[in-house]
Amino acid sequence: MANTKSRVATVSSGDAIPSQGLLVTRGIDLKPHKTSRIAVSGDVMLNRLETNIIDTPDFQRLRRIRQLGTTYLVFPTALHTRFDHSLGTLEMAARMIRAIRDNRHNSDDERNISEEDEQLIRLLALLHDVTHIPFGHTLEDECSVFDRHDANARRINRFLDSGSAIGTLIKTALGESFYQRFMKTYLTSKKDLALLGEDAYIYDIVNNTVCADLLDYLRRDCYFCNLVLDMEYRFLNYLYLLRTGSERRVVIRLWKKGTSSPRPDVLSELVRLLDNRYLLGERVYFHRAKLVSGAMLADAVQREKNAGLLSEEDLWEIGDDVFLARLADSKLEPVSVIGRALQNRHLWKQIYERNRNWIDTEQSEHRDIDVMAQTMELWWKDAKRRQEDQDYLSGCIGLPAGRLLLYCPDERMNLKLAEMKVLWNGSLQELAKCADEPVVGPKLRTILESHRQLWAIRGFLAPEHLDQTEACKEGLNYLLSFDPHSRDLAARDFYSKVVARVAASARLNDLPHSEFQRYEDDAVSRIMANTASNRTPAVVEEIIKNAFTRTDDNSTT
């Protein structure tokens, strides 16, 4: 036994995983201790350890974090929380375990899940979201203000390390070796699943493609948004565990065992699941008002972060409503304006959109760079740069900071469901590779392309400044142009709008049209003669005033 314990010394992602059944624990007790009844899932049975974990303040805080962030501004009943989703994920994981074990078409090895593995799966499902902060998906995945909750070492250590309340409970109940195995699986990313060996299937059940997390939130989000979609998960009856190399993986059997026949009914079920995920994305996750409110929130938080008034750690102990109240009371005017606007559902308006077709057009005209990769690097990954660029346009146009927003989400919006592992025609492959199937294949391809087309860069503008819509559009065209010729034309169009604004505000435009046009052309040429880095809003305004205020033979304008 001592040798076994020495094999699991740390939780570093590079360490080896011990073989199943060799861990030293203090005894697995799966006997139900309490029952929690929640919407969608019904009764969720909790053993004593799970009950104790739920009762910690660190887990209870999930009651104050809504599952869908600002979506309640669109769907008023979308008030469900990370707390009930975590319980639902635990129940869905338990259902998946039962489905694998009870399928008599599977061999003993294909359905063998030990009690120790079952407890590990249950804890991972229960705690998969424990590191979430208020509006986490918006601030992390969508807008890159903070690192992702599941790839954030400091946050994971805060809630789960050996000295945390939850970590201590796990170690006390199940021993150091089990705790190390738990942390190893929790910390492993999808790309490093090989490091988990046989435990890779445990990750599959909780976090991968057709996983307990996704299967719960699809149903739960539909329920609380009052969307009626068919969410019968009959395909779970075809789950099994496949050994591939040193790994065990969760696979869906789409081919009748021992025959050359597919299972079109199961394939149709999976395609319907993909379709439901797309519909939920279209109607909920990418609803325009939800995107606008998310962009507003991210902008406010980035400003607080830049000013040193807010750190990620400040969000580890609070919930959504306290956070919004804090933004509304900010010392920074752009932040307090946005905070109060969100509290009162006073949302900015969409004035601009560029989708993947635009990316394709830009790419065809400018082939020496990867346009999408460059777009992601500039305006998704770099939240500070995104804010600086939008504020530059605002400064030139004469808008207060925070009234014009640029929203650029991650382009990797391919459905991870399409990556689920299936047994098809005698081989293990991703569901997306079954698109050549004559009956459901065309629908599968259509769904994947439709989901891809949900992506777009958007511009949002405060309602009280909609009279500046055209200038903002020209500015965004300029900002988002990659082809040098197109960028030059867009810059001239934008600065022409700026010249008109400055001239009007300084009462320099009381001239005959032809004469004003000459001054405007001169001002734009002077602006363009400066390098882009020197065209600050103040410099641009000075150039314009100098161009209009000059002495000639007849008069001083």
Image (tube, rainbow, N blue to C red):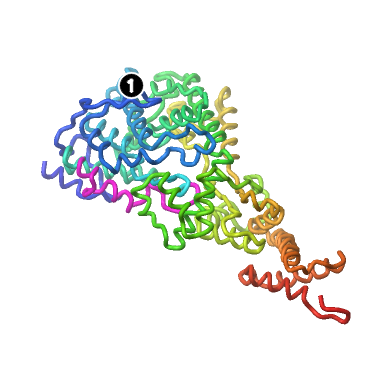
Residue 158, magenta (yes or no): yes
Q: Nearer the viewer, residue 249 or 156?
A: 156
Dominant secondary structure (helix, strand or loop) of the stretch shown in magenta? helix
> Which percent across, then down, holds residue 399?
63, 59
Vertical placement of residue 446 versus 522, above or below: above
Q: Secondary structure at mark 1?
A: loop
> Which percent across, then down, holds residue 67?
43, 38
The quadrant of the rendering that contains the N terminus is top left
Give the mark count: 1
Residue 110 appears in the rendering: no
Residue 537 appears in the rendering: yes
The quadrant holding residue 400 is: bottom right
Query: Which residue has dot 1 on it?
Result: 106
Q: Residue at x 58, y 60 (%)?
A: 391
Q: Nearer the viewer, residue 337 or 183?
A: 337
Q: Residue at x 18, y 42 (%)?
A: 171
Residue 309, magenta (yes or no): no
> Which percent across, then down, holds residue 348?
60, 47
Amino acid on which disc 1 is placed: Asn
Q: Is residue 509 left or right of residue 108?
A: right
Look at the image and give the residue range highlighted in magenta.
Answer: 142-169
Q: Is residue 49 left or right of residue 498?
A: left
Vertical placement of residue 555 versus 13, above or below: below
Mark 1 burial class by Cα count in 10 Å: few <14, some 14-19, many 20+: some
Q: Residue at x 74, y 65 (%)?
A: 499
The quadrant of the rendering that contains the C terminus is bottom right
Q: Nearer the viewer, residue 337 or 548?
A: 337
Seen from this angle, which residue lies furthest left?
2
> Which percent across, then down, holds residue 329?
46, 54
